[in-house]
Image (cartoon, grey):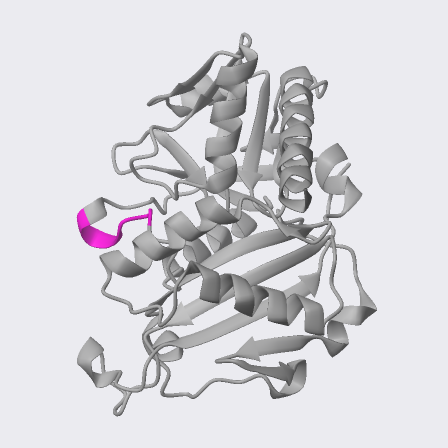
Amino acid sequence: MQTEHATTHDALEDPRNADILIYVNGALKPRAEATVSVYDSGFLLGDGMWEGMRLYDGVWAFFEEHMDRFFDSCKAVGLDVGTDRQGIFEALEKTRLANGMVTDVHCRMMLTRGVKVRPFQHPSLSRSGPTLVIIMEHSKPVDRLASAGIRLATVPQVRGLPMSQDAKYNSHSKLNCVLACLQAEQAGADEALMLDPHGFVNTTNACNFFIVRRGEVWTSTGDYCMNGVTRQKVIDLCRADGIPVFEKNFSLFEVAGAEEAFLTGTFGAQTPVAAIDGKPVGDGSRPVTARIQALYKRALAEYVAAKQG
């Protein structure tokens, strides 16, 4: 029986990560020396956007979709990236080559509004240009995520309305999700299952959420959650392979009767859910999840091969 807490980002320990070089505004710095100013808008206010990406055989998986989301988010909040997509790609390549990285690598790329002249909120106080940081780690998901699965607990913290803080922003402002994760841990679970403002099942604190009912795959409407790159890939793959898939409102009633449930995210791809609110999900066989995992692996391999060719 699973007793210790797990997360959807649990990775195998890799000693090489102690000596990684981190990209900070064009310079590559040893991990212990990679710092930003305490006046940086990201540190002061969480004013910034980020992307999580994975490297497979020298290829950044689904790079175009990640850049679509990143540049759209930055434009929406008036955050000047300071470069174009090619410039971001070159920064990624500079960092991975300096670290000798080829595969099973996870990248967190962060852009803030930059250093402020005074420690206050107004964006005009950031006058020196954006801060770009790229952290890459040797990172392979632990096997138990695919076998034992994740335990979720429904929490009171919700993903809010777009006029408060639109969940479609992949922003540095993550307190809402941190609170949800704390509530889930207090309930004895690994991560949080969050509802939308109307009480429908939405997402987890870290990943998008899917259930399988009578051969159909369901996920939220997408109105109140991060529209994940992997989430969309799963929806597209289901449609192409004849698996009925629906973006719809559904409640905890339908979740309780689901035969399978899984999470999607760049790091773990598709992570099975073992239990929700202390109740096991299905009988643990997960045939539809396994089918989707196989489809995703094939699509990823085809993407990598096309980029290498």
- Left or right: 260 as drawn, with respect to 99: left
Q: Which residues are magenta?
A: 163-168
Work out whether residue 288 or residue 5 is closer to the camera in this orientation and state it: 288
Residue 219: % across, % down: 43, 26
Residue 186: % across, % down: 53, 51
Residue visible at 52% across and 61% down?
Answer: 89
Furthest-bottom residue in this view: 117
Q: Quadrant of residue 127?
A: bottom left
- Rendered view: 26 above or below 230: below
Asked if residue 257 shows in the view, the reply is no
Residue visible at 67% across and 66% down?
Answer: 96
Residue visible at 61% across and 71% down?
Answer: 94
- Rendered view: 204 above or below 239: below
Residue 24: % across, % down: 52, 80
Count the marks. Answer: 0
Furthest-right residue in this view: 15
- Left or right: 125 as drawn, with respect to 93: left
Name the image quarter holding the C terminus.
Answer: top right
Residue visible at 39% across and 34% down?
Answer: 202
Work out whether residue 113 or residue 13 is closer to the camera in this orientation and state it: 113
Q: Quadrant of residue 77?
A: bottom left
Name the image quarter holding the N terminus.
Answer: top right
Asked if residue 191 shows in the view, the reply is yes
Furthest-front residue in this view: 309
- Rendered view: 58 above or below 228: below
Residue 87: % across, % down: 46, 66
Work out whether residue 216 or residue 239 is closer to the camera in this orientation and state it: 239
Based on the picture, tell me whether residue 130 belongs to the magenta stretch.
no
